[in-house]
Image (cartoon, helix red, strand yellow):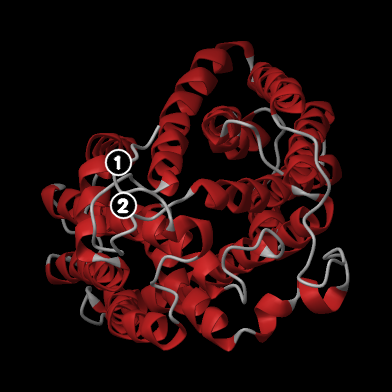
Amino acid sequence: MSLPDPRTETHTLLGAQLVFNIGFYAVIPFLAGAMGTEYGLDAAAIGLVLGARTFSQQGMFLFGGLLADRWGARRAILTGCLVRILGYATLAAAADFPLFLLGAVLTGAGGALFSPALESQLSHADRPPAGGPGAGGRRSVFVWLAITGELGAVLGPVLGTALLGWGFDAALAAGIAVFTVVTVLLWFRLPRGRPPRGRDGAGTGAPGPALECLRNRGFVVFCVLAGTNMLAYHQLYFTVPVDLDRRGLDAAWLGALFLLASVLTLLLQLPVSGLGRRLGPGRALSTGFLLVAAAFGIAAVTSVPAGTPGSSVLPVMATVAVLILGHMLLTPTILSLIPGFLPSPGAVAGRGAYYGLAATCGGVTVLVGNAGLGALLELTTRHQWWPGTPWLPPALLALLAAAALPIVLRGHGADRPTGPAAAAAPSRRSS
């Protein structure tokens, strides 16, 4: 599906990402507190609800991508918005554990339908410069996706905090209103069209062609290695708060660290993406993962035993800053490389499944990695090992990805512009 003016569609999709994130972050960061204080759920129930939301989103990204290929991106995006609205309405009606669980699952499923469809559709507007990966020219559309997503992640909690004075239901009502508005706008702004067709002219609904991404060994290896980026980023939610607690620092510092991450992203995403274009995909991935490894190295070297009084927050801030720099370099590069793994990189069909598989691999990496890191944190405390021990495995994984991903790209030719992207004029500006 395409608009007469592709820029209009790109602007529409980027605007949808912004509003989608505002609606998400106005509610979800406050869900745990509301379940505990307003509804009296215990910690185990709250943990299960939050885990179910994450799993229903991360675990269903591949399924969402398959539906995007079968239905077309427009239908999948609109369905994702409607399912998210239904999830929020269920949370608003909930007063006990079963409905909270159902609402959380629906909320996650809405994201699983929305994101792969939006990313696969945006990939058609992602045009590398004609001179090759290291040439100048327009920025990847995924750079703008990262910026709009981060802006939504900043504005959403502000909206949610302002509404919490009226209770959690007010935040949910605002979220429902936001998603309703974006659904109506997308209904009129996104063009109607038939679902993408496969190479033989058949639809992509058949399981064989749709799951072709799972038989693409090079792409599966790419996804597994690239999933380290998501594992690293999610340490902002896991090991970084643990490190603050070990240092005896107030929990308010966590909010300051998230603000630091957001400010860095908004200020530096464009210049960092320019560096990535000059480096080329392989070197950009290596540099990004080396920065991630350096961040965990800083955390390991500056680590302190639990309960150490008077510890400084500066090492944690340095860890977060370097980690975010690596993340800014990696995420747009990874997303822009995915179409190069398709059997016909310029084709419309199949992109949703490829983007869905990449996101699902990232989610599985986070699930398995955090489970292992949690056990290692417990063992480190129990046996009084060197306090930097838990930071070593993610640092080693980042080093492995830095070394292996350029080899994977060269082996499959995925670092070369293909199809319509290869014909983009280098002087054409991003919009």
Residue visible at 57% across and 68% down in the picture: 345
Q: In this view of the protein, which residue sits in the foreground, 144 or 48?
A: 144
Quarter occupied by the C terminus: top left
What residue type is disc 1 on? Thr
Q: Residue furthest top?
A: 166
Measuring 54% from the left and 52% from the top, which residue is drawn there? 123
Kind of residue at badge 2: Met
Residue in the image at 43% along x and 60% along y: 422
Residue named by callout 2: 328
- Observer able to see residue 336: yes
Query: Which residue occupies the foreground of this view, 360 or 192?
Result: 192
- Residue at 65% over, 34% down: 3
How many angstroms separate mark 1 from mark 2 (CA)?
7 Å
Residue 238 appears in the picture as rendered? no
What percent of the width, then of the height, locates residue 294?
18, 68
Residue 392 horizontal/vertical position (percent): 27, 79
Q: Secondary structure at mark 1?
A: helix
Residue tagged 1: 265
| Depth check, front residue: 236 or 312 | 236
Q: Are marks 1 and 2 in contact (CB under 8 Å)?
A: yes
Residue 397, placed above or below residue 258: below
Give the class, few, some or many, for how many residues have Cα within 10 Å of label 1's Cα (few <14, many ≥20): many
- Left or right of residue 216, residue 261 in this image: left
